[in-house]
Image (tube, rainbow, N blue to C red):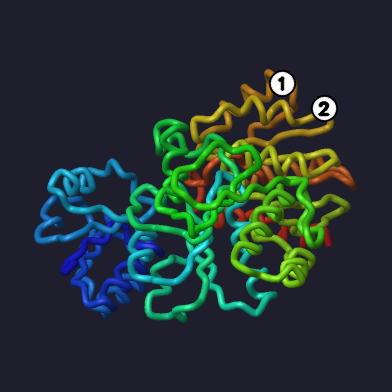
Amino acid sequence: MKRALVLGLARSGEAAALALRSEGVEVVGYDRDLALDPAVAGRLAAAGVEVQLGDEDDALLREIDAVIKSPGVPSDRPLLVAARARGVPVLSEIELGARLLANPLIGITGTNGKTTTTALLGAMFDAAGRAAEVVGNIGRPLTSLVGRVADDAWIVCELSSFQLEDVDTLRPRIAVLLNLEPDHIDRHGSFDAYRDAKLRMFERQTAEDVAVVPRGFAAVPGAGRRVEFAGDDALPAEPRIPGAHNRENAAAAVAAARAAGLADDAIAAALRSFPGVEHRIEELREVAGVRFVNDSKATNVAAARRAIASFDAPLHVILGGRGKHESYDPLAADLGPSDRAYLIGDAAAEIGAALEQAGVEFEQCGDLVSALRAAAAAAQPGDVALLSPACASFDQFVDYEHRGNEFRRLVDELAGDAR
């Protein structure tokens, strides 16, 4: 590879471009956002990256040996279609990292629980005193490690379906599948296509590798030694993080940690101390006897249902955002007569129809500020006010982190008002 085009210049794209430059590759970095962060553009230009912004043009492919695709870029973008038609390889940022790094890698994917399990596994390596880097969909690009990690360090990598769309040589020594439920159908087009993208993680495993899967899960591609887990497994210690779904995540992390050779005492220490991750059933504070919980990372119905099942108190749940072509009927069925919903975003009308059919009280609020005010006004001491949207955030926010941080800020303001 002498000259590469990096498509999309957010975190993953910037890291990929800088990694390629460190390897002596000529790089064109393209983003159609004319308002690209000047700091990002400056870092890329200083490294010798040719930055192009604005409308797509096939001329960007001139003398290009490979295209590196950021995970946020759909595979049907015209520039990618043109590249494949010309026989130019299209690689994901994860695939590029796999080619540039020889470290043993643990890949973790699934519909829900990826970030929690990835972070928990990283905590287990820390407790064991073993060198490990936690990267991927959790927020730190894999290619950011190029030239910055010891050769013998393990890499614990959260992998989304978007990141797994264009991999050819990625071979995790340990590959963990947590679960598979409908998600991102708006991008992949069907559940089968979504599932196939997830399972690509296993395709190049050999008999020397380990495939960690839910008990009873159908066969996965590849030849990794199969290890099954379930939420009722005996663990070295009970996890600090609550909920049946988190016990499943912990069981998967334990299986992967043991496959990597970590001792049970270190695994147990991490289970007892790991507090969970931001934006996933994250208890923020109590105001006037009401517990406020941030579950902004619940970007699909299955994730929101797990959050709802974690509480036995009356719920005031904020739902909505950009939908993913899922049915909201199962979510509505999980809410009881003492629960109430507050709806925001593009999917509010569709969610409202499901709630009305199920006999659940709800209020159309439009935005997060209005929803939180309404929930706080209606909630009684002992109740839980829960942001668990069951939708993507992109209609009103940059991402789920932006949404969760805004919820935290609003709750802090509410606490100030209460004082």
Residue 68 x %, y %:
28, 58
**Numbered tag placed on residue 398 in the rendering:** none
The three-letter code of the residue at mark 1 reads: Ala
**Residue visible at 71% across and 60% down in the picture:** 413
Give the Cα distance between marks 2 and 1: 10 Å
Residue corresponding to mark 2: 337
> What residue appears at the point 58 percent right and 53 percent down from the top-left corner?
114
How many other residues sit within 10 Å of disc 1, few (<14), some (14-19) or many (≥20)?
A: some
- Location of residue 259 in the rendering, given as x and y in whole percent from the top left corner: 61, 62
* Residue at numbered disc 1: 358
Q: Which amino acid does label 2 sit on?
A: Pro
Q: Which residue lies furthest to the top in this view?
A: 357
Q: In which quarter of the image is residue 7?
A: bottom left
Q: Which residue is drawn at 75% across and 42% down?
A: 375
Labels in figure, total: 2
Residue 161 against residue 237 in the figure, above or below = above
Look at the numbered disc 2 and give the secondary structure of its residue: loop
N-terminal label among 2 and 1: 2
